[in-house]
Amino acid sequence: YLFYHEGDIRNAMELAVQATQFCEFKDWWWKVQLAKCYVSLNLVRDAEQQLRSALKQYHHVETFVRLARIYMRLDQPLSAQEICKAGLEVFPNDVTILTELARLHEILGDVQSSIKLYRNVVIEDAMNAEAIACIGVYHFYNNQPELALRYYRCLLLLFFWNDINGTENFWE
């Protein structure tokens, strides 16, 4: 509540520190919350330490992804990649980790691996708009407009379906 609703990072951090101490540093969840506060305050190394400690206690997808993003922020993409691969060993074919790893490959300029990972994401979650769009863009810029059109049509159907069913409208 303090972090997300009120935006009071310092009090949220103080609460997380107190809760972590009360739990005798054995609760991974509070360490992750503390890491969120540290990142918001640009204390990235402290956040890394908290997330590493949380991973030693309990493996959670969010922890792997947050730690990978910290390494990207520290301009250490290979470390981020290793964290994502470690996460995939624990959570095989997890869409969130696969997507993060695909983004990393894309940032590193390894487009082929990125597209392969995005295809794996689509296999696991056929309605993943980011993966469908990235594959479509890849085909468009590689002079394969027919394939790109197929993916764009899929995206339009996805957005149209959500709009008709009264669910989230992606255009607003």
Image (cartoon, helix red, strand yellow):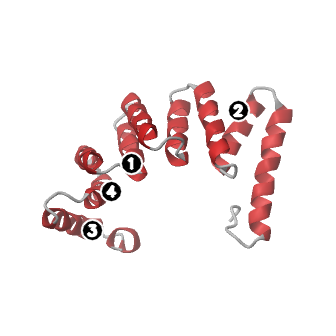
Determine whether the residue tagged by mark 1 lies in a helix, strand or loop. Answer: helix
Which amino acid, mark 4? Answer: Lys
Residue bearing mark 2: 138
**Mark linked to residue 36:** 4
Q: Are marks 1 and 2 in contact (CB under 8 Å)?
A: no
Percent position of residue 20, x then y: 18, 62
Which amino acid, mark 2? Answer: Tyr
Mark with earlier residue (2, 3): 3
In the picture, measured across the screen, residue 57 lies left or right of residue 127, that is left
Which quadrant: the C terminus?
A: bottom right
> Is residue 155 depicted above or below 135 in this figure?
below
> Is residue 70 depicted above or below 40 in this figure?
above
Mark with earlier residue (4, 3): 3
Mark with earlier residue (4, 1): 4
Percent position of residue 24, x then y: 13, 61
How crowded pointer 2 is (Cα within 10 Å; few <14, some 14-19, many 20+) is rated as some
Residue bearing mark 1: 66
Please tell me which residue is depicted at 31% across the width and 70% down the height of the picture.
Answer: 8
Real-space Cα separation, disc 4 to disc 3, in angstroms: 10 Å
Real-space Cα separation, disc 1 to disc 3, in angstroms: 18 Å
Mark with earlier residue (1, 3): 3
Please tell me which residue is depicted at 74% across the width and 38% down the height of the picture.
Answer: 136
**Mark linked to residue 12:** 3
Viewer-nearest of discs 1 and 2: 1
Please tell me which residue is depicted at 30% across the width and 56% down the height of the picture.
Answer: 32
- In the picture, residue 110 is in which quadrant? top right
Q: Are marks 4 and 1 in contact (CB under 8 Å)?
A: yes
**Mark linked to residue 133:** none
Real-space Cα separation, disc 4 to disc 1, in angstroms: 9 Å
Please tell me which residue is depicted at 41% across the width and 52% down the height of the picture.
Answer: 62
Real-space Cα separation, disc 2 to disc 4, in angstroms: 33 Å
